[in-house]
Image (tube, rainbow, N blue to C red):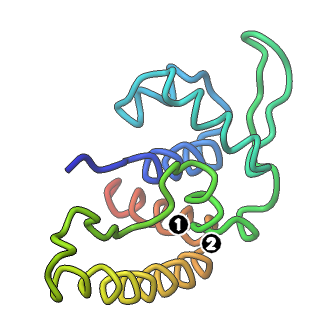
Amino acid sequence: MKYSHRLSDAVHILVYLEILGSASSSTIADSVNSNPSLIRRLIARMVKAQILNRQGRGSEIKISLGRPATQVSLLDIYQAVEDHQHFLNVDPEVNHNQDLGRSMPTVLAGIYNEVQVTAEQRMAQISLQSIITAVRKQMQREDK
């Protein structure tokens, strides 16, 4: 199974911009340990979602938050950058000729939906500002 790192990378970009300021996609990519084209794609998605503002052209582009970090939730970021919005997925390739095979998808879909709703509610409560504050604290501990 392949896991997406888009959310982690997007949060990394946002925290980078808030702590270190606007930088080139190459510079940010170096911090994320990714490639500049991925960084540009994630930034474009966050601009479209109005999480980020992009001003200027060419090498003069400045990127900044589109609204205060206290008003950006982890859920906002997730919804902006992830194509597939469900955490858990039911296997549709079960044997529908058996009672158990017919029953499992319905039961699991209900349970997985509960997990999804609970996770999204919690993500909506976590602000970008709280993440920035935690990163700053961790950086200070590591500097000692």
User: Label 1, on which residue?
Assistant: 131
Q: Disc 1 and disc 2: Cα gap in Å?
A: 7 Å
Q: Residue at x 53, y 30 (%)?
A: 39
Residue sitting at the far front: 97
Q: Position of residue 76 (x, y in %)?
A: 65, 63
Q: Which quadrant of the figure has residue 70?
A: bottom right
Q: Are marks 1 and 2 in contact (CB under 8 Å)?
A: yes
Q: Residue at x 37, y 47 (%)?
A: 5
Number of marks present in the image shown: 2
Say what amino acid the circle numbered 1 marks: Ile
Q: Residue at x 82, y 14 (%)?
A: 57
User: Label 2, on which residue?
Assistant: 127
Say what amino acid the circle numbered 2 marks: Ser
Q: Residue at x 70, y 65 (%)?
A: 72
Front position in the image: 84 or 139 = 84
Left or right relative to 123: residue 6: left
Q: Which quadrant of the figure has residue 99?
A: bottom left
Q: Position of residue 11 (x, y in %)?
A: 52, 53
| Residue 4 drawn above or below residue 123 | above
